[in-house]
Image (cartoon, rainbow, N blue to C red):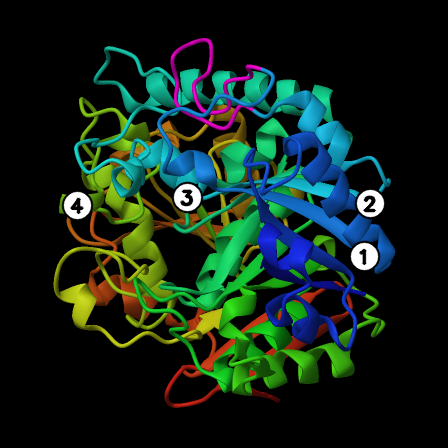
C-alpha cells in the first residue's frame, strides 16, 4: 500500500480554508505541512505547533513538518532565543528548536521532518537567500574546505552530514527526509539516515529522478518518497491535470512508499476544486488503501550507473557555485560522465548536458516531458556492493572515485554473472589495462565483458549496448516476481500500462 498526502501551508490548516478542506474531502493518509517558527497569531510558535498537531490528529492523518523558510531567511530567532538558521559552526542550515518538534509530535502523529530543497542549499550555497535579501548571494550550508580535491571535500561533507542527521534524530523519532529539486545527493543523504524523496514532474523526467532515488533506496535499505510537484520553473501550476494523475499512478506502480502533491493552491480556484484538484481526488478514490504486494526493495534494475556523487547534475552559470558549493571545485569530464551515460541508455532522449531542464543554455527551450524511454535503470554511488548490483546486466562506471570493494564486486559479477561493464580506462582491472586501444575496446572476461571507452557519446558504443536498452517509447520496471511496462504517450506526459 502506498500512503497518499498533500502539501499544505500552516495558515490553511489553522484557518480551515478551502485550500485545506477541499483536497482532503476524499480523505488522505497524511499532510505535508509547510511550517516555520512564525507564531501565526498564537501566543508563541509552540502553541501554534500544538494546534497543527491537533488538526492532523483530529482528521486521523499523519503530519510531516516541511521546513523551507530557512532557505530564504538569513537569521531567525525564536521566542525563547533559539537561532533557527545559523549553526554553531557558522553554516547556514535548518537548526530546529527541539521544543518546537516536541510540540508538533504532541498528538503522536508526527510522521516526518522534511528539509525542503536541502540538496540545493548545499550545492548552490543557499542561493535562495537572494529571495529574502537582494544583496545576499548565499551562504554555505556547511563550512567548506580549502581544497581542490572534490573527493576530500565530499568525504568531509558526508561526515558533517551524518553528524547533523544524528543531531536531528536526537530531537525526534520521526524520519528525516530531504526534498530534492535536482537529482543529486540521494545516496549521501540516505547513507546519513535520510529518506530519499524525489520530485516528480518539476523539470526532470520523473522516471529518471526515480532511477537515481531508487538506487539510493535499494543500496541503503531506505523507503522511497516522492513529491509530485506542480511547479515548473517559475510557473505554478506548470503541469496539467492529466500529467498530475499520470505521475501519481507512476508513483504507485514503481513501488514508491509515500507520494504527496505540491501543493493545495494549485488544486483549488475561487473556493472550488479545479481540474487538477479533481484529478487528485480521482487518484485518491482509486488508489488510497489499494493493496500492492511489492515495494521498492523488490525493484530489480538491469542497467546501472555507479558514480561518486560530487553534486554535479549539469549546472552552469546561475546555479554553479562549485561542487558542494565550494567555488574551488570545478566539475570536469569525470563529473559529466554519468549524465552522458543516462543519455546513452535513453536513446539520446535525456540530454547530453543534463536531464534537468534548469540548465542555463538551450535546454531551457526543451519542452518538458514527465516520462522518457528507460529500461530497468538505477543509479548507485561509489560504495555499492554485490548484493545491490547482482541483478544488473549492464553497468557504467563513472566519476571521480569508486571504492576498491565495489570495483572488486563488479569484477566478480563480470566473470561469474556475465555482466557487461562500460568503463573509462581508469577503472579497468590492471590485468586488462594493456589490452585497450583506440575507440571502444571489448575485452572478454569469464562470462562477461568490459567495454573500455572515454566517450560515452560514441555511436560505436551505443551499437554495442543497444541489446540492453529495451524498446524506445517504453519504461520497463522489473520487480522480484513481475514487471511493469509502460508505453509512453508521444507528448511524454502520460502512459498506458502494457
Q: Earlier in the sequence, mark 4 or mark 1?
A: 1
Badge 3: how crowded within 10 Å, few (<14), some, or many (20+)? Answer: many
Q: Is residue 452 visible?
A: no
Name which quarter of the figure residue 2 lies in: bottom right
Q: Which residue is mark 2?
A: 109
Badge 4: how crowded within 10 Å, few (<14), some, or many (20+)? Answer: few
Q: Which span of residues is magenta-colored? A: 81-95
Whether residues under marks 2 and 1 lie with C-beta atoms below 8 angstroms apart, the answer is yes
Which SS class for mark 3?
loop
Q: Nearer the viewer, mark 3 or mark 2?
A: 2
Residue 285, above or below 309: below
Q: Is residue 191 visible?
A: yes
Q: Which residue is mark 1?
A: 61
Residue 330, above or below 232: above
Q: Nearer the viewer, mark 4 or mark 2?
A: 2
Whether residues under marks 4 and 2 lie with C-beta atoms below 8 angstroms apart, the answer is no
The secondary structure that dominates the magenta segment is loop
Q: CA distance from mark 4 to mark 1?
A: 40 Å
Q: CA distance from mark 2 to mark 1?
A: 7 Å
Q: Earlier in the sequence, mark 3 or mark 2?
A: 2
Q: CA distance from mark 3 to mark 2?
A: 30 Å
Q: Which residue is mark 4?
A: 318
The percent coordinates of residue 477 (x first, y second) are: 60, 69
Which SS class for mark 2?
loop
Amino acid at each position: 500500500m502506498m500512503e497518499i498526502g498533500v502539501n499544505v501551508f500552516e495558515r490553511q490548516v489553522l484557518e480551515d480554508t478551502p485550500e485545506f478542506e477541499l483536497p482532503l474531502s476524499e480523505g488522505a493518509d497524511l499532510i505535508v505541512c509547510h511550517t516555520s517558527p512564525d507564531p501565526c497569531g498564537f501566543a508563541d510558535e509552540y502553541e501554534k505547533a500544538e494546534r497543527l498537531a491537533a488538526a492532523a490528529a483530529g482528521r486521523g492523518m499523519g503530519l510531516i513538518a516541511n521546513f523551507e523558510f530557512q532557505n530564504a531567511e538569513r537569521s531567525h530567532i525564536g521566542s525563547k532565543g533559539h537561532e533557527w538558521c545559523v549553526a554553531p559552526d557558522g553554516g547556514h542550515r535548518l537548526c530546529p528548536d527541539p521544543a518546537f518538534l516536541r510540540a508538533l509530535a504532541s498528538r503522536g502523529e508526527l510522521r516526518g521532518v522534511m528539509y525542503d530543497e536541502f540538496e540545493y542549499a548545499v550545492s548552490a550555497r543557499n542561493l535562495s537567500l537572494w529571495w529574502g535579501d537582494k544583496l545576499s548571494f548565499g551562504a554555505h550550508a556547511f563550512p567548506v574546505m580549502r581544497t581542490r580535491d572534490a573527493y576530500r571535500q565530499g568525504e568531509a561533507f558526508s561526515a558533517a552530514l551524518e553528524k547533523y542527521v544524528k543531531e536531528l534524530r536526537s530531537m525526534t523519532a520521526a524520519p528525516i527526509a530531504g526534498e530534492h529539486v535536482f537529482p543529486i545527493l540521494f545516496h549521501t543523504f540516505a547513507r546519513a539516515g535520510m529518506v530519499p524523496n524525489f520530485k516528480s514532474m518539476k523539470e526532470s523526467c520523473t522516471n529518471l529522478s526515480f532511477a537515481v532515488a531508487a538506487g539510493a533506496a535499494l543500496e541503503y535499505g531506505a523507503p522511497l518518497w516522492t513529491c509530485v510537484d506542480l511547479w515548473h520553473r517559475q510557473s505554478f501550476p506548470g503541469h496539467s491535470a492529466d500529467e498530475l494523475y499520470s505521475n501519481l499512478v507512476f508513483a504507485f506502480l514503481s513501488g514508491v512508499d509515500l507520494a504527496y502533491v505540491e501543493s493545495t493552491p494549485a488544486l483549488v480556484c475561487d473556493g472550488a476544486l479545479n481540474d487538477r484538484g479533481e484529478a487528485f481526488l480521482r487518484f485518491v478514490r482509486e488508489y488510497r488503501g489499494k493493496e500492492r504486494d511489492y515495494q521498492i526493495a523488490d525493484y530489480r534494475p538491469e542497467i546501472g550507473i555507479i558514480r561518486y556523487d560530487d553534486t554535479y547534475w549539469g549546472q552552469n552559470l546561475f546555479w554553479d557555485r562549485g561542487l558542494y558549493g565550494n567555488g574551488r571545485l570545478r566539475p570536469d569530464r569525470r563529473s559529466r560522465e554519468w549524465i552522458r551515460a543516462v543519455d546513452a541508455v535513453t536513446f539520446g532522449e535525456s540530454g547530453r548536458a543534463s536531464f534537468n531542464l534548469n540548465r542555463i543554455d538551450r535546454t531551457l527551450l526543451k519542452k518538458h516531458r514527465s516520462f522518457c524511454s528507460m529500461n530497468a535503470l538505477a543509479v548507485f554511488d561509489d560504495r555499492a556492493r554485490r548484493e545491490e548490483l547482482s541483478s544488473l546486466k549492464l553497468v557504467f562506471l563513472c566519476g571521480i572515485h569508486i571504492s576498491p570493494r565495489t570495483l572488486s564486486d563488479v569484477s566478480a559479477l563480470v566473470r561469474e554473472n556475465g555482466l557487461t561493464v562500460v568503463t573509462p580506462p581508469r577503472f579497468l582491472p590492471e590485468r586488462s589495462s594493456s589490452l585497450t586501444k583506440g575507440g571502444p575496446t571489448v575485452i572478454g572476461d569469464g562470462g562477461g565483458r568490459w567495454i573500455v571507452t572515454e566517450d560515452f557519446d560514441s555511436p560505436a558504443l551505443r551499437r554495442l549496448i543497444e541489446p540492453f536498452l529495451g524498446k524506445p517509447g517504453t519504461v520497463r520496471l522489473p520487480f522480484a516476481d513481475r514487471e511493469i511496462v509502460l508505453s509512453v504517450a508521444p507528448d511524454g506526459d502520460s502512459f498506458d500500462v502494457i
